[in-house]
């Protein structure tokens, strides 16, 4: 059974940094294309970043490009999201997601991911 567990969320002030972690179990971690999504109150879940099986390729939403960095270490079964220069607009529940497929055409689509974590809250407020 595949499980994804996020951690690292918490209240932060605008302009500061935070690093989220996602630990996977149940299958070899390099079996998965991985991604981070987020969902703000009253809004749909949206794509944040995705990373290929080996970590060689990464993709970002325009709203976080140059501020967030996605990475992974398959030997540690872990993916991270380094978030810098946080803004109040980044406030959301952040979810990690995994897919056994990782086509370029759909890796930003929430429907492409089979496995999801429980989410971790990131409120950005002064």
Image: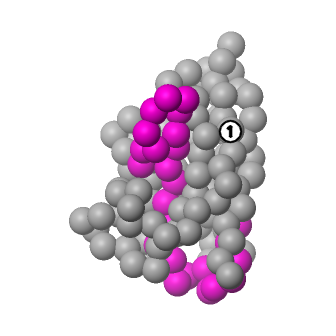
Point out the residue furthest to the left here. 105
Name the residue at 28% across, 68% down: 104
Residue placed at 30% from the left, 73% from the top? 103
Part of the protein shown in magenta: 23-47
The residue shown at (70%, 77%) is 25
In this rendering, position of residue 76 left or right of residue 113: right
**Residue 84 appears in view:** no
Q: Nearer the viewer, residue 118 or 67?
A: 118
| Residue 26 is covered by the magenta coloring | yes
Image spot of residue 38 (x, y percent):
52, 43
Which residue is label 1 attached to?
A: 121
Please tell me which residue is depicted at 71% across the width and 27% down the height of the picture.
Answer: 12
Q: From the viewer's side, name the closer residue of 35 and 93.
A: 93
Q: Does residue 28 belong to the magenta stretch?
A: yes
Crowding at mark 1 (Cα within 10 Å: few <14, some 14-19, many 20+): some
Q: Can you say which quadrant of the picture contains the N terminus? A: bottom right
The x, y position of residue 36, in whole percent, is 52, 54
Q: Quadrant of residue 51?
A: bottom left
Above or below — where is 74 with respect to 38? below
């Amino acid at each position: 059974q595949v499980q994804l567990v996020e951690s690292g969320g918490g209240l932060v002030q605008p302009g500061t940094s935070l690093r989220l972690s996602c630990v996977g179990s149940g299958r070899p971690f390099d079996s998965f294309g991985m991604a981070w999504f987020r969902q703000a109150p009253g809004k749909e879940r949206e794509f944040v970043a995705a990373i290929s099986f080996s970590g060689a390729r990464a993709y970002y939403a325009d709203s976080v490009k140059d501020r967030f960095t996605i990475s992974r270490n398959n030997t540690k079964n872990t993916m991270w999201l380094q978030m810098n220069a946080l803004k109040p607009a980044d406030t959301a529940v952040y979810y990690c997601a995994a897919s056994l497929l990782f086509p370029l055409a759909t890796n930003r689509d929430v429907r492409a991911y089979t496995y999801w974590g429980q989410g971790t809250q990131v409120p950005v407020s002064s």
